[in-house]
Structure formats: structure tokens, C-alpha cells
Amino acid sequence: MKKLGVYAVLTAPTVSFLLLLSGCGTSPTPTPTPSSSATPSATATPTPSPSVTTPVTKAFAQYWVADTSHGFRLYREYIRLEITPDPITSSLRALVAGIPKDSDYVSLWPKETKINSVVVAGDKATVDLTLGKMNVGAEAELMAIAQLVWTATAADTKVKRVQLTVDGKIVESIAGHVDATKPFTRGLTYEVLAPVWITSPEEGARVSAQGFTLSGMASTFEANVAWKVFQNGKLVQQGSTLASEAAPAWKPWSVAIKGLTPGRYMFIAMEFSPRDGSLVAQDTKNATLI
């Protein structure tokens, strides 16, 4: 079993029916009778409207890729999808056919890729693909596979292993570099996930300016997380905070930010190298405070 390391998103129309009752007589002197003067349409029961069914949805995690000084790493976003008996298939199809909310993220899977089927047996999901043209190196191939593995195992937490097949067959490799004959599992967080994430606010969110908290996840040296706030390209606040535990642990961090008035802002969370102060990784989010 291989671990993945850095290198190794109804309303039914209502139809009404109007019944028109009419007749024509052939007698030259028709005489109305009580029965012929009845008005059935006045007492007819209206046809009931079809019931409206609203699908039940939930937030599913999707994993995207961005570059850091450590190489390619995964970042997470959430998308709302309809709850179905087959959450892995819907999650993976939305991933390979979609685009991330954050323009800093990308998918390493070509748009021509199709998720044909997912079969779950015990803790293993077999995901069958039809591949588009995939011309990437070994590191990018690993991160592309990690995108699927982390998204699939988030959609169904009972699944721990993911076997990839292409058009129904196990293949030696997806893009020519990584052995795909055996199931993949999630790798170590500090080898696969970006060192620092912003999880709130989400990209494009509208949130209250009252009691605003910037928060995320990190795996950084001595748990350090630097942050900055920009408005209209101007730095308005900055500082640093600590995650609840240092690397290699993957832990939450948060900072209460005061004094921001309603408006649009960009938030940045960063890790800097303890050796030379260079930027290791960052995550940015644009949000509107109301």
C-alpha cells in the first residue's frame, strides 16, 4: 500500500387545468330542465398541484493544488452537492469538471478526464477513469492522485484506500511515473498539505465585521503563522499568531481582528523560513465584511 508524499456544487412548474363544459342542441325549441341547468364546473374539485421536492445538500471537501517552496501542496475548499448514495462519484466528478473558487489553486487533471464509476468494497474504493491527455512530471502526478484520494476519502470517511483504474483496467501508471497497480492512501499531512491554510473566511464570502475572526490550519515551525489584511491594495493590519501545536502536527490557528469597517478585504496567512526569512507558503482569501 502506497502513501502519497511530496515526491513517491427544483422547483417543478405548477400546471393548472380549466375544464370548459359546453354543449349544442338540435331541437328548434329547447326547453331547459333542472338537470341541464346544473353547473358542474362550479362544484368541481380543483386538481391538486404537484408537490415540490427540494434536494438535500451538504458541503463536500475538494482538494486543489498550488505551489510552495516545498513543491506542490494541497489546499481545501468546500462545495455543496446533493446527498446521494454515491457521494464519492459526485464529489470526484465535480472536482475534475470544476474550477476552484480561489484563483490561486489549480487542478492537475485535464478537463477531458471522466469519472466512469466508483465501487466501494469495505475500506477500498475502486475509481475508474477515462483519462485526458496528462503530460506531467512525477511530483505533479503524485499530487494529481492525491487530489482524488483526499477528495474521495473525505466524501466517504469509511474509505481509506483508493484503487485507480483506467477504462476498467489496472494500469502500471497514470502519467508514466508513479506505480498505480496498488491502492493509494492519504499521505502524511505535512508532506501533502500546504503548511498554512485560511479556512475562514472562504474565498468570496460575505461575513459580519462584528467580532471577526481569521482562522485556518497550519503545520509550521514553532507553530508560527503570520497574517496580513489589505483593503484596495493597502496594508491595513498585520501580525502573527500561533497554531495550537507546531509541525509536524497539523493544527488550527485563529486570530480575532478588530477595527475593520464594512468593505472588501484580502486576507493572507503565511509561513516564513526560520533560516533566512523567505516565504515558504501562503494562502489568500478575498471576502466582504458587512
Image (cartoon, helix red, strand yellow):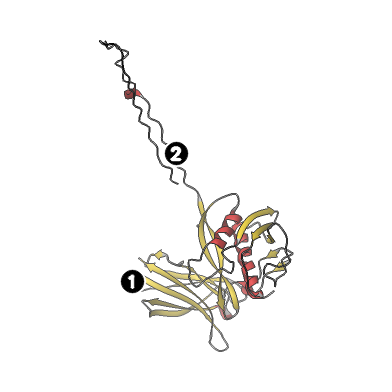
Alpha-carbon span between mark 2 and mark 1: 45 Å
Q: Position of residue 248 (x, y in %)?
A: 62, 75
Per the image, label 2 sits on a secondary structure element best described as loop
| Mark 2 crowdedness (10 Å alpha carbons): few <14, some 14-19, many ≥20 | few
Quarter holding the C terminus is bottom left
| Mark 1 crowdedness (10 Å alpha carbons): few <14, some 14-19, many ≥20 | few
Q: Which residue is mark 1?
A: 261
Q: In which image quadrant can residue 142 be found?
A: bottom right
Q: Position of residue 32 (x, y in %)?
A: 27, 12
Q: Residue at x 37, y 29 (%)?
A: 46
- The kind of residue tagged 1 is Thr
Q: In which image quadrant can residue 288 be found?
A: bottom left
Residue 131 at least partly seen: yes
Q: Residue at x 66, y 58 (%)?
A: 127
Q: Which mark is residue 51?
A: 2
Q: Nearer the viewer, mark 2 or mark 1?
A: 2
Q: Position of residue 53 (x, y in %)?
A: 47, 43
How many discs appear? 2
Q: Nearer the viewer, residue 256 or 173?
A: 173
- The kind of residue tagged 2 is Ser
